[in-house]
Amino acid sequence: MGMAAGAGSRQGCMLGFEACWELTSGGNKEPGRSVAKLQLEAVSRTSGCWALSQGEPWETLWKEDLPYRDISGRDGFGVFQLGLAAPCRDCAPEDQISQDQIHHEVQDYYGRELQKSEDLKTNACITPTRPVPKVVRDALQRVHEEVVARYYGCGLVIPECLASCRVLDLGSGSGRDCYMLSQLVGEQGHVTGIDMTEAQVEVAKKHIAYHMEKFGYQKPNVEFLQGYMENLGDAGLTDESYDIVISNCVINLAADKRAVLREAYRVLKPGGEMYFSDVYANQHLSEAVRKHRVLWGECLAGALFWRDLYSIAKEVGFSPPCLVTASPITVSNKELERIIGDCCFVSATYRLFKVPGSNWAGPGQVIYNGGIVGHERELVFDANFTFKEGEVVDVDAEMAAILQSSRFADKFLIQGGGTDVAAPQGCCPGKMKEKICDPFLLLQQRAAPAPACGAARTCEPQGC
């Protein structure tokens, strides 16, 4: 494999790219890269990087400008075997960081540098979310100690009403949540964990037999795959094959968060749910934060501005996010605190539902029938709706559609004609009650400790 950051006297280094090529015979193919036969006609500056184009030439790229292997036998423009690697570190646009770089850095950080949760420099990956039901606590007690020690996530991310469900865990790490879910879905359910870090997947896989024996299962109901949550199809995960997708503090590690949500939406069945915790910022992050290696590993450099989650979810097709809970993130490292500056972070849990179009109607009234294990008398659905057994609750059109189309449908008596009582705070005009969607505002209203900020100022919550 040959590699260079561009060559030739006219252009010098091609901004944003290193170019890779491999010999048609006798060369070693770089793992994970696809090397295509491309007609080199032109290049265009797209999204901060140089991209090959078949269309109108913005700038001509001659053969001598790149390392290449001519396999066309023609003069002038030809067909070359060429691969495009990660952005050139010496000359890439300052505001760009490639997915490949992020994958490499995160795999190294979680696979080699972190050996236990105490090695973390912030509490972003171990922040608890809300009180844990006894059934979940008991399930955690039966998980192997090595799996627990090598797991890094925002507390426990376990939704309700799981019996016989098919669940996918994005960024499953050492498998802690998967082994808890394995018990909660039961032997008739199934849990798939996918993670990009080989060392973490190996830890998870080696304890499958231990857990199946401990749970008394005749055959495994859990599997672990190595792959990327942005490309679940590469791991063989098909459309509409899961009831629930969970994720515990890992979506921030993906540069393309739209791709993650798009893939989650694809593999969910109609009425399915994405239940996930992640790290969010109160503003768009500075370049210094976004390019900091340790802050990537600590789940902060890739944190999404919380407002952007709502626009991405809508774009992908999900129902508006339901904010469940939020916890402050603290930074115990002075150097990291200096780099973060006035940015604040929280870990927050959200629920997104894949609501079929036919289920959208109007507001309604619902009565919780009870009976969900661990939530028999009261179901705290999110920060805005708590359902007590036998009580009539007015819900907006969004919640009515969610309850009617999801696995919760048979747990509720649902009637139309209620008052639209919960308008998202700051997002659309309120009727009788404001709906909280800002995790920083939720922290303030619940008198939680202030979220982590740099030394520059104290954070102030924002509207929706």
Image (cartoon, rainbow, N blue to C red):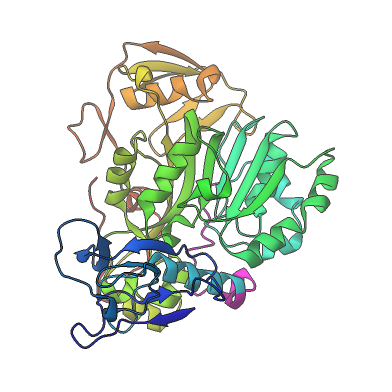
Instruction: Out of 181 and 325, give the one closest to the viewer.
Output: 181
Residue 17, how many percent across, how many down? 32, 74
User: From the viewer's perspective, is 429 left or right of 65?
Assistant: left
Q: Nearer the viewer, residue 355 or 412?
A: 355
Query: Closest to the observer: 27 or 271?
Result: 27
Residue shown at 21%/39% (left/top)?
427
Asked whether, in this view, residue 393 is left or right of residue 77, the answer is right
Horizontally, residue 189 falls left or right of residue 54, namely right
Q: Is residue 388 visible?
A: yes
What residue is drawn where x is 35% and y is 11%?
416
Q: What x and y, as percent, mark residue 162?
A: 62, 33
Q: Quadrant of residue 293?
A: bottom left
Please indicate, yes or no, whether residue 122 appears anywhere in the rendered image.
Answer: no
When the figure is inspected, residue 135 is found, relative to residue 460, above or below; the finding is above
Q: Position of residue 372 (x, y in %)?
A: 61, 27
Locate residue 330: give its quadrant: bottom left
Asked if residue 69 is positioned above or below residue 429 in the image, the reply reads below
What residue range appears in magenta?
A: 112-130
- Residue in view at x 34 percent, y 81 percent: 89
Q: Is residue 127 magenta?
A: yes
Q: Position of residue 246 (x, y in %)?
A: 53, 45
Q: Is residue 371 left or right of residue 42?
A: right
Q: Is residue 410 above or below residue 296?
A: above
Quadrant where the C terminus sits is: top left
Is residue 412 highlighted in magenta? no
Predominant secondary structure in magenta?
A: loop
**Residue situated furthest bottom in the rendering:** 9
Query: Residue drawn at (39%, 50%), measured in percent from left and top?
Result: 259
